[in-house]
Image: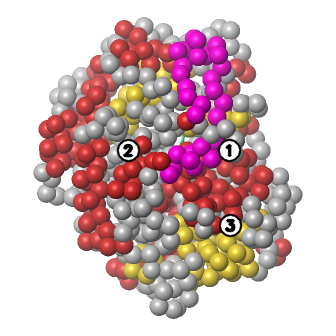
């Protein structure tokens, strides 16, 4: 597949129709779709290398092993105001394929209400029914085996899925038997099994994974979108190319005409005839914009970065799913005797998720929502511009209606590592948080990490939901299905009784991220802190778009990759001008 990939910058053309910054999940989708037209030339500049072809990238049972390697950016984050545990390093793919090469392969969609909320914020066309065709376009779905349907009561609806898209969504051939206890435990608390999460993402379900069912290996942006495109002479990708800034004309509406990058210690500039497309992910896209002089004017002035466009929303509205592992051990969890070592390698861990509307786990739903409606503070950073605050107020009203609805989930319960040794590690994570973080550069140096400040749980209502999630887990672990696994509460949480005690424990044990960084260059009205319009064009510029997880206005209640693929597929049609 690397035969037509450009190895040296001197083999490049001096000019391309489109230059895509970042050869990750979204960038490769757009590069592939644009080069379907053989007269369109595209260059992808990717900071990372090709993966080394090792099993660690593609064998499901090895997932997680590449974290912390040279293929991972490992971006440090700022210590939290509320979470004392939150100065973590965030994993992000620095490799062709981006984070889709590193992720845990969970392949799921958010609820229709999550995407309709994007349109309600003024982003015309960004609703569930429009996105559904792009979810399908990106996917080839293979249903579970007949024996799995019988043994695990699995259900599915093929018509909700794609049949011929680039990314494979399938179920691993082996599923840990105790996954069934998880599903039945949820059912016994009145939480229904979703018939197919693809169109009905509320309740408990067995999730598909981005795995090619023939080879039982990872299906990701490189295999699905890059490999086929690399056979086209109008498609070029240059790895080890760190983009440092975008060059824009000095006209009244500046036009992006070129990209500056460093390749093998050389600083190089390449020209874009039509557009520059940012796909560097939710951490690096706002960084590149700020380095280019597009961002909050006060920040840029302080750092002596010449202002190109004053856009106060760049780097704001930062969201993720704060999460915590509930520490239990399970005495009666095992890997079936009949499984060989190879079987263990093809089984992903976990396989079931539960997405809960607030009232399904919180007895305090109405008082929490009333408190939200009455909130006078915003708990945004004191440095936040008025436009961004105005946009947040609109979001908050909408979010509280999602918190109050059975059509949207505010808590996820996930199960990982269903192995003999570790037991199911149960993780709860907050969906649709009200707290907002920010990502801002701290110097002109394009190789320095920006300050990544999650600000998780700064809005106190997020913590109230998390406490109710924690208490729900105790109830769940006492269901007869979960009791069969002989759970034992770890000593550190055994004594926790009051909300205050649980809050303190969460403050030092929750994590600000579930690796779902997004929303830092979000779609929206300019006077409401939006960075791109509903065609994903950066406000106040020409020839500059964003297509990655940064453009989402609100994080959906799902793991992010399926949504990133769908957004990028739709972005490609917008760029082609066929929408
Ligand atoms: C550890 C981990 C586990 C995850 N697990 C799951 C999961 O199980 N299921 C799920 O649905 N989602 C999961 N996700 C989330 C999902 O993978 C991401 O949301 C998605 O891949 C993001 O796509 P993106 O295009 O926005 O960014 P990325 O895929 O990260 O792409 C950005 C690309 O830009 C490149 N880049 C950055 N800066 C520059 C620069 N200056 N110059 C040139 N190139 C640059 C990067 O190297 C990268 O290749 C996980 C993510 C991680 C990190």
Q: Kindly identify which residue carries mark 2.
A: 113
Residue 565 versus residue 491 in the image, above or below: below
Quarter containing the C terminus: bottom right
Q: Kindly identify which residue carries mark 1.
A: 165
Q: Is residue 41 left or right of residue 258?
A: right
Q: Is residue 145 magenta?
A: yes
Residue depicted at x 28% and y 51%: 398
Percent coordinates x, y for residue 561 in the rendering: 55, 46
Kind of element beneath mark 2: helix
As drawn, the label of residue 45 is: 3
Name the residue at the right extreme: 3
Span shown in magenta: 130-159
Q: Is residue 483 left or right of residue 352?
A: left
Q: CA distance from mark 3 to mark 2?
A: 35 Å
Residue 169 versus residue 306 in the image, above or below: above
Percent coordinates x, y for residue 459 in the rendering: 24, 50
Kind of element beneath mark 1: loop
Residue depicted at x 71% and y 35%: 212
Q: Are marks 3 and 2 in contact (CB under 8 Å)?
A: no
Q: Is mark 3 within 8 Å of ligand 1?
A: yes
Q: Is residue 359 left or right of residue 133?
A: left
């Amino acid at each position: 597949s690397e035969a037509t990939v450009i190895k040296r910058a001197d083999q490049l053309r001096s000019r391309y129709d489109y230059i895509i910054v970042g050869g990750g999940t979204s960038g490769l989708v757009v590069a592939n779709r644009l080069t379907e037209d053989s007269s369109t030339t595209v260059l992808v500049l990717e900071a990372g290398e090709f993966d080394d072809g090792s099993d660690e990238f593609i064998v499901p049972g090895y997932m997680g092993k590449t974290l912390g390697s040279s293929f991972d950016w490992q971006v440090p984050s700022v210590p939290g105001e509320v979470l004392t545990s939150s100065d973590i390093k965030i994993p992000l793919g620095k490799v062709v394929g981006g984070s889709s090469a590193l992720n845990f392969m969970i392949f799921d969609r958010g609820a229709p209400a999550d995407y309709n909320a994007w349109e309600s914020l003024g982003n015309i066309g960004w609703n569930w029914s429009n996105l559904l065709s792009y979810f399908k376009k990106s996917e080839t779905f293979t249903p579970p085996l007949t024996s799995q349907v019988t043994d695990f009561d699995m259900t599915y609806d093929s018509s909700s899925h794609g049949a011929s898209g680039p990314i494979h969504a399938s179920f691993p051939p082996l599923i840990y038997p105790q996954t069934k206890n998880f599903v039945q435990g949820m059912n016994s608390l009145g939480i229904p099994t979703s018939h197919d999460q693809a169109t009905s993402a509320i309740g408990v379900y067995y999730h598909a994974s981005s795995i090619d069912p023939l080879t039982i290996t990872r299906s990701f942006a490189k295999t699905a979108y890059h490999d086929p495109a690399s056979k086209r002479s109008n498609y070029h990708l240059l790895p080890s190319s760190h983009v440092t800034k975008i060059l824009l004309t000095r006209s009244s509406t500046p036009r992006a005409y070129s990209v500056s990058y460093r390749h093998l210690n050389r600083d190089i500039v390449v020209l874009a005839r039509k557009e520059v497309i940012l796909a560097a992910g939710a951490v690096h896209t706002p960084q590149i914009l700020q380095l280019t002089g597009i961002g909050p004017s006060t920040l840029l002035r302080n750092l002596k970065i010449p202002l190109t466009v004053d856009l106060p929303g760049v780097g704001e509205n930062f969201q993720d799913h704060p999460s915590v592992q509930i520490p239990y051990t399970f005495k009666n969890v095992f890997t079936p005797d009949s499984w060989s070592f190879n079987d263990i390698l093809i089984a992903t861990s976990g396989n079931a998720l539960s997405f809960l509307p607030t009232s399904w786990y919180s007895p305090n739903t109405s008082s929490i929502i009333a408190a939200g409606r009455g909130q006078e503070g915003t708990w945004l950073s004191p440095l936040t511009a008025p436009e961004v605050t105005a946009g947040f107020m609109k979001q908050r009203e909408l979010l509280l209606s999602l918190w109050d609805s059975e059509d949207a989930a505010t808590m996820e319960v996930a199960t990982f590592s269903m192995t003999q040794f570790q037991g199911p590690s149960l993780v709860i994570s907050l969906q649709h948080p009200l707290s907002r973080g920010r990502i801002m550069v701290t110097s002109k140096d394009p190789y320095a990490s920006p300050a990544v400040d999650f600000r998780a749980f700064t809005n106190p209502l997020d913590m109230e939901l998390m406490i109710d999630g924690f208490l729900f887990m105790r109830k769940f672990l006492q269901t007869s299905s979960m009791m069969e696994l002989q759970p034992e509460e770890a000593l550190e949480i055994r004594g926790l009784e009051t909300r205050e005690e649980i809050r303190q424990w969460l403050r030092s044990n929750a994590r600000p991220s579930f690796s779902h960084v997004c929303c830092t260059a979000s779609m929206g009205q300019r006077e409401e802190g939006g960075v791109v319009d509903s065609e994903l064009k950066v406000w106040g510029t020409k020839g500059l778009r964003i297509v990655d997880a940064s453009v989402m206005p609100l994080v959906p209640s799902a793991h992010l990759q399926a949504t990133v693929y769908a957004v990028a597929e739709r972005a490609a049609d917008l760029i082609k001008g066929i929408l």
